[in-house]
Amino acid sequence: MGIISSGFHGKRHAGNPALPPGQHETDTFPVLTAGPAPNIATADWEFFITTGAGQRHTWSWDAFMALPQVEIRTDIHCVTSWSQLGTTWRGVSLDTLFDEVETTSEFTMAHSYGGYTTNVPLQDLLDGQAWVAWEFGGRPLERAHGGPARLLVPHLYLWKSAKWINGIELMNEDIPGFWESNGYHLHGDPWREQRYS
Ligand SMILES: Nc1nc2c(c(=O)[nH]1)N[C@H]1C(S)=C(S)[C@@H](COP(=O)(O)O)O[C@H]1N2
Ligand SMILES: [Mo]
């Protein structure tokens, strides 16, 4: 074939099919946070889902940990153009958390401890596409990366994966979250390069 010459490591190979357009691979995990990292003890941690009809479902850390835990192996893509391939996580599928929730709402807002928000359509959170993750690379998620737990929505740019997740608010209309109000795309699909609006 002669396309890949010896000595070429392929890391920044634009043709790597795992890399969305405009992305390059990195082995490091940069920390990107707007503002200080909140410090949430698991004893104080709570996860909520609120519905448009005014119902509030909540899980303590112990109740959350008693739910089925799954291993996730996935690529993650940051809008600043780095991607990490084959990262491993452990957490609870949003399908499990939404099992007991009845709703007709199509949109959600993820709320983090510390006030960060990001909007995600409900259909992007279901069907094995999103998790509340508390382990990264076989270790408890570091606080800088969102520990004790963060939302993980790896098929969208990483700003949608809210660190220090507190809960999901169901909404009947799509309302921009923190970065979306500051020019980031409402949806954020890396394969369609939905970076900015
Ligand atoms: N709570 C919270 N979550 C957040 C952010 C933030 O500032 N606060 N930054 C987002 C952005 S812009 C990115 S790129 C990723 C970075 O995740 P990392 O710091 O683990 O690399 O977290 C996202 N989740
Ligand atoms: Mo980001």
Image (cartoon, rainbow, N blue to C red):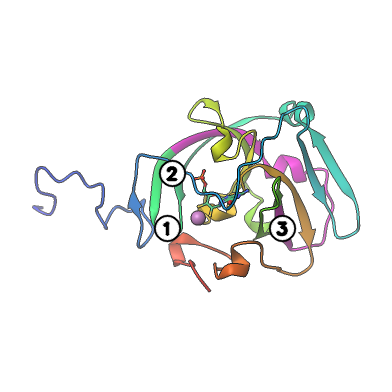
- The verdict on residue 14 being magenta is no
- Judged by depth in the image, the label closer to the viewer, 1 or 3, is 1
Q: Give the range drawn in magenta.
A: 87-110
Which image quadrant for residue 178?
bottom right
- Residue 117 in percent (x, y) is at 67, 56
- Residue 56 in percent (x, y) is at 88, 48
Q: How crowded is mark 3: few (under 14 residues within 10 Å), some or many (20 or more)?
A: many
- The amino acid on which the numbered mark 2 sits, given as a three-letter code, is Pro
The Cα atoms of the two marked residues, 1 and 2, are separated by 11 Å
Q: In this view, does 139 lie to the left or right of 99?
A: left
Question: Which mark is drawn over residue 80?
Answer: 1
Closer-to-camera residue (128/116): 116
Residue at horizontal 67 percent and vertical 35 percent from the top = 39
Closer-to-camera residue (17/1): 17
Q: Is residue 12 left or right of residue 114?
A: left
Q: What residue is disc 2 on?
A: 30
- Judged by depth in the image, the label closer to the viewer, 3 or 2, is 2
Give the mark nearest the N terminus, 1 or 2: 2
Label 1–label 2 contact, CB within 8 A: yes
